[in-house]
Image (spheres, rainbow, N blue to C red):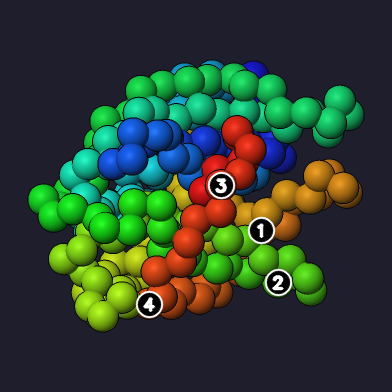
Amino acid sequence: MPAVNDVIQTAVSWSNPSGGVAMNIFTSILTSVAINAWADVADDFEAYLEDLYAPWMVRVSDQWVALGFKLAVRDAGAGQWNQVYERALTTIDGGDSNDTTATLASNTVVAYPGAVRYRGFKNFPPASDAYIDGGLLNITGLASLLTTGTIWVNPFAGTACNFNNGVYSLATEQFRGFVGTIAAGSVVGSRVTRKTGVGI
């Protein structure tokens, strides 16, 4: 059952225009739990993901199609993530009719947990060509990216649970919550391909 101080990893996936699967991974800590069932906690995480992506995915090509999300809880003693829930998610598809030329690029937000040497990076699916001017994200796209970034670093209050987002150190098994400060730029960055489960 979910419990206060559980550290949760949320993995969100899409099929992308290149025919592959792209993923965002978030780390959160449960700060309160009102309903002790993972299905109800998943309802809250689904609502959070819809809120989070709503400002940004309207700027992303409709060739990005959401597949679903998975929740895993950290077992620090065993040093592993244990999946507790999986659900299809079709409400965070790309919403722009224009193509994305840089299909393997991303738009990045950096968040800060208030601890020296620690930062959180989130590489969101790239904006469509309609929001790229001279190779840079335009002001409309940047405003949407900053809005999504702000939602990412702030606490979420749901029906079954409340949670904060942050970063998790596998070396120390310690969670550090974000302090609400973000940075985002207009440069469209290259996405580094990582091993399965790490995300973009």
Which quarter of the figure is the N terminus placed in? top right
Query: In the rendered structure, which disc, 2 or 4, sits on the residue that comes first in sequence?
Result: 2
Please tell me whether residue 185 is drawn above or below residue 120 in the rendered image: below
Q: Which residue is mark 1?
A: 177
> Which mark's residue is nearer the viewer, 3 or 1?
3
Q: Amino acid at mark 4?
A: Ser
Looking at the image, which residue is at 62% across and 21% down?
A: 83
Looking at the image, which residue is at 23% across and 78% down?
A: 133
Cα gap from disc 2 to disc 4, whole angstroms: 24 Å
Query: In the rendered structure, which disc, 3 or 2, sits on the residue that comes first in sequence?
Result: 2
Cα gap from disc 1 to disc 2, whole angstroms: 8 Å
Cβ–Cβ under 8 Å for marks 3 and 1: no
Q: Is residue 13 left or right of residue 83?
A: left
Q: Which residue is mark 3?
A: 193
How far across and how far down the image is residue 5, in percent?
Answer: 71, 40
Query: In the rendered structure, which disc, 1 or 2, sits on the residue that comes first in sequence?
Result: 2
* Tag shown at residue 34: none
Q: Is residue 109 left or right of residue 178?
A: left
Q: Which residue is mark 2?
A: 114
Q: Is residue 66 left or right of residue 99?
A: right
Query: In the rendered structure, which disc, 3 or 4, sits on the residue that comes first in sequence?
Result: 4
How far across and how far down the image is residue 62, in percent?
Answer: 19, 44
Cα gap from disc 3 to disc 4, whole angstroms: 21 Å
Please tell me whether residue 60 is drawn above or below residue 85 in the rendered image: below
Q: Amino acid at mark 2?
A: Gly
Query: In the rendered structure, which disc, 1 or 4, sits on the residue that comes first in sequence?
Result: 1
